[in-house]
């Protein structure tokens, strides 16, 4: 197990400076921005005042400030994330600030740990928080691997636990998410811990029934594990609200433990709620928002309109609207025409796990469901008389506890309109567990060893190739350096709405070069919620294109979506084809990217096939220069943060807005 944890650590801690701390992940950027204002209160009389406290993630404090960035003051803010990761990141950073000067002399100066975590490089708070919090996320994911081993050993055997931990150690989606300061890895850790402790409590109950001894009190270990599980549930929900589904295995475990199931359940709910309140106090205290549910008629009962007032409830409602697709938010339109459930599975097979591990994982999921159904004998009079036939499953109730979490998670999230791959991270540890258990249940020893070796070897190579992207400069850093060296200051550089802009402020040739040296404007092909094309938008964008010197295409956020949606974008959907073909008078002058690579071969996502676009010749030559495989379409959330394909176009022909407009087909009203 030590070797597995070492491999886990290497994959997760390597490359935590993957963007040179330029904050290219938008969710992480916002969480860290908020974290710079979380301070220990100097006046405890206002410490829990929603409008004055420096603890409140929903409100910019009146005196908020941080070196190197602009921080609003005394304003509400939309913080849609769990507070537990936020507070843990701040605590870890403050701890490193305190011990850094003492520890730094013990380590080489050029180590990332010394330079960035202990902050011997003198990073401003905004960057130091990012470095420390990414390392903390990696540490939590390392803990998840350890918990999966314990869970596999508890439910099946040490061999299953080791194999499941090894599968999770090289799981590429986990490796990637461990490099971001976001909430999902924390929710996953506390979820696995909660279910492990619930299973421990259930196991002690079953042990008590089988081996009751006079004058022996078995309640103590059950109570301890039960309280630990309850605390972890509170922390999981405090990391991300979707963990509320843990109430289902909690109810099942309470019913199984003893006759006083209502007492056990009540104790757990109280403990979890108390934990949530302690770690998310302003989810309960801040009622400065407006959350109105409309009046409705339910049969003979009239329910009046209600204003809940809770900022926490407001953010949950906003997120729920977003994932259901009701907000029609531009950055979620990539999921138009994607199939529920199947798209999640496809992305895991192509990118999250890789084909071999993914097929084994989802096969193991089906096997676990079937084994649980097939091997349970249901008593006619008392459903609690369920018992397990001869099987390598330790207990039917233990496996049911895991299924009571995973199946509802798949049913609910799999049907979302928005299908970010990370939504299934709290599912993957259990898929790794069942993949290992299913494989170990095969009768043929040679088949087990052959398939297990092939899956582990293939997935390890994929993990190595993915980690190799962090040995290359981030494409936006490389593109920024190219701009500073090749573009005259003052040139107008266009970016696309809902994407970032270049260049990033950075040292170049020993001199600090700043973004402000180059004017920037946004092309609004992918516009706001519920917006569609109109003549005004076309005229405004073409005026910018006629005036600009360069256009940057940082990711496929826009060109991967707009051309696929000709109904809301009958005009905008023509733009990228015209740009890539050179018809607009812009020619690509620089292209850069980074993809998983091993032994000189790349695994490239296809960002042009889904929108049916032909890449410019320079881009095509760039892609073909390196031997590799086409991995097919990829979810935006997997590629746009740490491995985007970036293209810079120069305005060579200098066409007028009138000439540009003649190239577009304007639909009749």
Image (cartoon, rainbow, N blue to C red):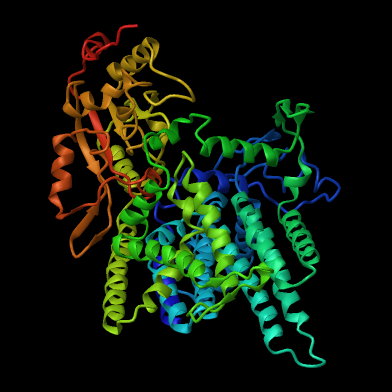
Q: Measuring 82% from the left and 45% from the top, which residue is drawn there?
A: 46
Q: Residue furthest bottom?
A: 214
Q: Measuring 48% from the left and 57% from the top, which residue is drawn there?
A: 425
The N terminus sits in image quarter:
bottom left
The C terminus sits in image quarter:
top left
Q: How many marks?
A: 0
Q: Which residue lies furthest to the front in this view?
A: 380
Give residue 463's position: percent from left, percent from top.
33, 64
Q: Measuring 35% from the left and 66% from the top, which residue is drawn there?
A: 360
Give residue 291's position: percent from left, percent from top.
70, 32
Q: Is residue 199 above or below residue 1?
A: above
**Quarter residue 397 falls in:** bottom right
Give the left or right position of residue 140, taking residue 57 as reference: left
**Quarter residue 448 falls in:** bottom left
Give residue 522's position: percent from left, percent from top.
39, 25
Give the left or right position of residue 83, taking residue 460 as reference: right
Give residue 308's position: percent from left, percent from top.
75, 34
**Quarter residue 302 falls in:** top right
The answer to which of 49 and 98 lies nearer the viewer is 49
Q: Is residue 39 above or below residue 456?
A: above
From where the camera sits, is residue 118 visible?
no
From where the camera sits, is residue 93 visible?
yes
Q: Measuring 28% from the left and 11% from the top, which residue is drawn there?
A: 666
């Amino acid at each position: 197990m030590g070797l597995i944890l070492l491999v886990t650590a290497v994959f997760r801690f390597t490359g935590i400076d993957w963007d040179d701390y330029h904050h290219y992940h938008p969710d992480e950027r916002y969480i860290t921005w908020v974290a710079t204002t979380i301070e220990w209160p100097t006046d405890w009389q206002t410490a829990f005042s929603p409008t004055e406290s420096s603890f409140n993630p929903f409100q910019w404090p009146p005196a908020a400030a941080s070196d190197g960035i602009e921080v609003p003051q005394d304003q509400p803010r939309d913080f849609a994330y769990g507070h537990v990761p936020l507070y843990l990141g701040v605590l870890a950073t403050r701890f490193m600030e305190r011990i850094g000067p003492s520890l730094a002399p013990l380590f080489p100066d050029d180590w990332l740990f010394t330079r960035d975590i202990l902050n011997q490089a003198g990073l401003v708070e905004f960057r130091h928080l990012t470095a420390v919090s990414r390392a903390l996320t990696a540490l939590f994911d390392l803990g998840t691997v350890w918990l999966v081993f314990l869970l596999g050993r508890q439910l099946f055997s040490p061999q299953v636990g080791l194999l499941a931990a090894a599968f999770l150690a090289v799981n590429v989606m986990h490796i990637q998410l461990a490099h971001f300061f976001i909430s999902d890895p924390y929710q996953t850790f506390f979820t696995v811990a909660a279910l492990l402790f619930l299973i421990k409590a259930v196991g002690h109950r079953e042990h008590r029934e089988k081996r009751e001894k006079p004058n022996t009190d078995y309640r103590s270990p059950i109570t301890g594990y039960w309280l630990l599980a309850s605390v972890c549930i509170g922390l999981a929900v405090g990391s991300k609200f979707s963990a509320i589904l843990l109430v289902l295995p909690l109810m099942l475990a309470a019913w199984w433990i003893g006759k006083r199931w209502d007492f056990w359940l009540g104790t757990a709910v109280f403990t979890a709620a108390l934990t949530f309140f302690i770690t998310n106090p302003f989810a309960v205290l801040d009622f400065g928002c407006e959350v109105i549910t409309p009046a409705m008629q339910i049969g003979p009962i009239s329910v009046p309109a209600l204003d809940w007032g809770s900022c926490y409830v407001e953010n949950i409602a906003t997120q729920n609207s977003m994932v259901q697709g009701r907000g029609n938010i531009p950055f979620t339109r990539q999921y138009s025409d994607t199939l529920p459930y199947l798209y999640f599975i496809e992305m895991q097979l192509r990118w999250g796990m890789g084909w071999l591990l993914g097929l084994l994982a989802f096969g193991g999921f089906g096997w676990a469901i079937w084994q649980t159904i097939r091997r349970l004998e249901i008593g006619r009079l008392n459903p609690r008389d369920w018992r397990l036939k001869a099987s390598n499953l330790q207990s039917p109730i233990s496996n049911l506890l895991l299924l009571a979490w995973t199946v509802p998670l798949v049913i609910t999230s799999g049907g979302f309109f928005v299908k970010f791959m990370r939504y299934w991270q709290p599912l993957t540890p259990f898929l790794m567990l069942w993949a290992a258990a299913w494989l170990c249940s095969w009768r043929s020893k040679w088949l087990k060893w052959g398939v297990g070796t092939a899956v582990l070897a293939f997935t390890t190579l994929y993990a190595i190739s993915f980690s190799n992207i962090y040995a290359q400069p981030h494409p936006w850093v490389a593109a920024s350096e190219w701009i500073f060296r090749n573009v005259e200051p003052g040139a107008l550089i266009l970016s696309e709405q809902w994407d970032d802009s270049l260049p990033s402020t950075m040292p170049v040739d020993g001199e600090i070069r700043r973004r402000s040296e180059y004017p920037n404007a946004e092309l609004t092909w992918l516009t706001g919620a519920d917006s569609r094309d109109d003549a005004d938008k076309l005229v405004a964008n073409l005026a910018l294109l006629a005036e600009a010197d360069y256009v940057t295409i940082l990711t496929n956020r826009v060109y991967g979506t707009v051309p696929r949606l000709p109904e809301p974008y009958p005009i905008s959907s023509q733009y990228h084809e015209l740009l890539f073909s050179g018809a607009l008078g812009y020619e690509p002058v620089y292209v850069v990217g980074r993809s998983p690579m091993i032994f000189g071969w790349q695994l490239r996502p296809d960002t042009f096939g889904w929108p049916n676009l032909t890449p410019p010749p320079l881009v095509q030559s760039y892609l073909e220069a390196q031997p590799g495989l086409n991995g097919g379409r990829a979810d935006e959330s997997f590629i746009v943060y740490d491995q985007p394909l970036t293209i810079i176009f120069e305005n060579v022909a200098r066409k007028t807005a009138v000439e540009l407009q003649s190239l577009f087909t304007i639909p009749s009203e």
